[in-house]
Image: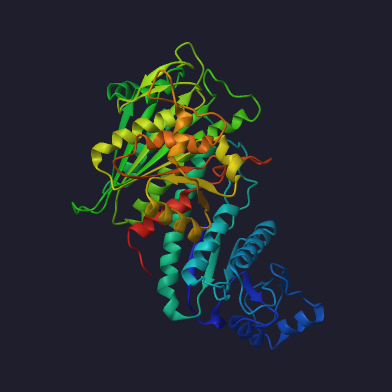
Amino acid sequence: MKFRIKNTNLKKISSPCTVLGISKINKFSEKFNIFNKKTLNYINDIILKRNIIWEIGKITLLYDIPNIISNLILLVGCGKNKELNKKEFIRIISKVINFLYKNRIQNSCWFLTELPVKNLNIYWKIRIILEIIGDRLYFFNMFKTNKTNIFKIKKINFYINEKHNLKEAEISLKHSLSILKGKNIAKDLSNTPSNVCTPLYLAEKSKLLSEKYKSTITTKIFNANQIKELGMNAYFSVGKGSNNSSYMSIINYQKNLKSHEKLIVLIGKGVTFDSGGISIKPSKNMDEMKYDMSGAAAVYGAILFAAELNLPLNIMGIIAASENMPDGNSFRPGDVLKTLSGKTVEILDTDAEGRLILCDVLTYVEQFNPDIVIDIATLTGACVVALGNIASGVMSNNKNLVNDLIQSGKLTGDKIWELPLYSEYKKLLTSDIADFSNVGGRQASAISAALFLSFFTEKYKWAHLDIAGTAWTNSKKKESTGRPVSLLCQFLLNKSNFTI
């Protein structure tokens, strides 16, 4: 699918379908007036005769308009106020793309970026439009034998009237397409079933990044034996019961070679299937456990985004991949594991495996003196109970980092909400035979899980994103949402000091 920014004489526009917004107060946009005048007021007369409704998202399709090259004119209602809010703008864009898809209109030109939206400039209008279109038109059909019945929109042109907005619009389109690319690959990885998407599969995908972006990315892969040799016993133990060995992929993106530039580390939980291990999960909805590697997929997408735009940053992405299965070799409830940090953990529940993988990786990255470390994980069902599928949870040892992440979420609509890491909660993880246990009971279990991770993050600024409720939809149509790729991409854009 192709997107283009255009600035040209409206009289020369040729498109199968032209999309225009109309409102009751403003009557018509500037471009609508030009089109209407060209048709000798024909469009306005039809609107009055048909009593076309101005309500937000209302679609009217006009055919065979005189003196217009376009075969179709699509009018979309924009309400009766002088200015739209963000939600209304999103609804309008959603209605238009749904209509185009349903009516199999492949090529169109849009004049919707000129709509007045509160607190949104041209850059953010295009970002929002591309995000909505990308989500609506995403299809995962890797395993479909018949791929011919999926309709594809081929081209959308966005017409910008003011020349001084062209540069801003082009930058927005470039950013949007890179985010869309990162988000779609994250969705593809998460949607791929566990018999294909194994830890080795993720390692091989990580190698492909360094092959494609040779000038900025290098990848180093550690197999299960090497993970064990490093002293990452907690990480190693999680995958012991699986025929699919664990792998850890270190993806280094380096664009800013200045020595004083600090490293940003993104760590993704990559449990390609989580049966719960010996503490096996109920069978209902266990198919969804292929999504337990969504954190790793998000990290992959964010690194790809950075490479696409050549962001002036140094980023380390870690894909911490494993599979948690029950077997004679599996780790057990009651076991005590010595982590890479030297701290010991009593295993009370083998289904709390993600934190065991992450704790060793969090210790491993100390040697690189990172400025910021963010782990992204489908970590706890408790976070789903607390926040549902609207917002991801964020917990951190640094308030400024939390604020930066929350701001990135607000800008992109990829919402997160901070949960507290009060020291009083630490008693939930008390163990009689080890330094602490790997679970803290039913109370505040999303917080106790993050507190467990915090024991290994005392030497740098760290934030934990619990995406268990937002990484995929558990409705009739189960699929990855690609979250929080948009948030991570915006965070990296902000850290690169991008200004329009």
Q: Is residue 107 above or below residue 441?
A: below
Q: Position of residue 171 (x, y in %)?
A: 41, 66
Residue at 49% x, 17% y: name it: 333
Residue 249 in view, yes or no:
no
For the C terminus, give its image quadrant. Answer: bottom left
Residue 463 occupies quadrant: top left
Q: Is residue 44 left or right of residue 208?
A: right
Q: Position of residue 314 (x, y in %)?
A: 28, 50
Residue at 45% x, 70% y: name it: 169
In this orientation, which residue lies closer to the viewer: 119 or 309?
A: 119
Residue at 38% x, 32% y: name it: 359
- The residue sitting at the front extreme is 424
Q: Is residue 414 above or below residue 340?
A: below
Residue 103 occupies quadrant: bottom right
Residue 267 in view, yes or no:
yes
In this orientation, which residue lies closer to the viewer: 268 or 382?
A: 382
Q: Position of residue 150 (x, y in %)?
A: 63, 48
Q: Position of residue 452 (x, y in %)?
A: 42, 33
Q: Is residue 111 above or below residue 362?
A: below
Residue at 38% x, 26% y: name it: 235
